[in-house]
Amino acid sequence: MTEMAQRRELGQAVPLAALFTAFLAVSLYGVGGGGGVVWARRIAVENRRWISNREFADIVSLCQVMPGPNIVGIAVCVGAKMRGTIGTIAAVSGFLVIPWAIGFSVGLLFLEYVHLLVVRNILGGIAATAAGLLIATGIRLLLPHRQRPAALLFAGLAFGLITFAKLPLLAVLFVLVPVSTAIAGIEKGRAR
């Protein structure tokens, strides 16, 4: 029986502060990408013994099919397993507080010096890079569907309506998503 199972039998719960600080540590130690999963395992399985190695492997497997970064999914799952919804909030908050604080601080610093040409050029370069990455990701997501004319049509419509017609993203999504979903359902029905 794991230590966590014993705690549950005795009615002891993992303190919210422990979940917060554990994932704060994961955020600090796991800087640079994949290290976060390693540190989350070390803290949750080896150090704190909240979950077993098998439970952690199941959580990682689940998080790999969920959208978003694996480590945020791990924080959600471990927090939920330990304390439910409030545990999820504590774990995710602990993980995100450092990146949020850094991003907020850098944003304030840029706002303070936005009148300088070099800062405006940096922000313009960041915006162009982000737009390029977003377009590249969209193209990669569209490639498996390049044989489907409807997919290409809706991708082109979305791009055109946002880029040239200057419509807001939400308006385009509210119009195109139901129509494209209906057409995909019709195509799938015909394929059967």
Image (cartoon, grey):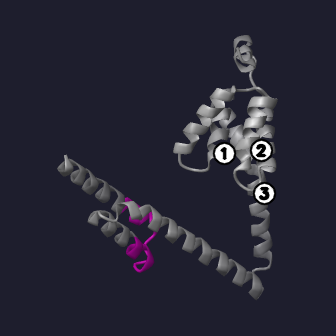
Residue 48, image quadrant: top right
Q: Position of residue 70 (x, y in %)?
A: 62, 46
Marks 2 and 1, how far apart at CA: 9 Å
Secondary structure of the residue carrying numbered label 1: helix
Q: Amino acid at mark 2?
A: Val
Task: Give the residue type at disc 3.
Answer: Ala
How much space separates mark 3 and mark 1, taking CA atoms? Answer: 18 Å
- 38, above or below 80, in the image: below
Residues rendered magenta in the picture: 159-175
Label 2 residue SS? helix
- Give percent across and percent down for residue 178: 32, 55
Give the side of residue 54 with respect to residue 141, left or right. Answer: right
Camera-side mark, 3 or 1: 1
Work out whether 185 lies above or below 173.
above
Q: Residue at the bottom extreme? A: 117
| Residue labelled with disc 1 | 71
Q: Which residue is mark 2?
A: 26
Nearest the eye: 172 or 134: 134
Distance in Å between CA atoms under marks 2 and 3: 16 Å
Residue matched to label 3: 101
Q: Residue at x 71, y 39 (%)?
A: 91
- The reply to whether residue 115 is visible in this rendering is no
Q: Are marks 2 and 1 in contact (CB under 8 Å)?
A: yes
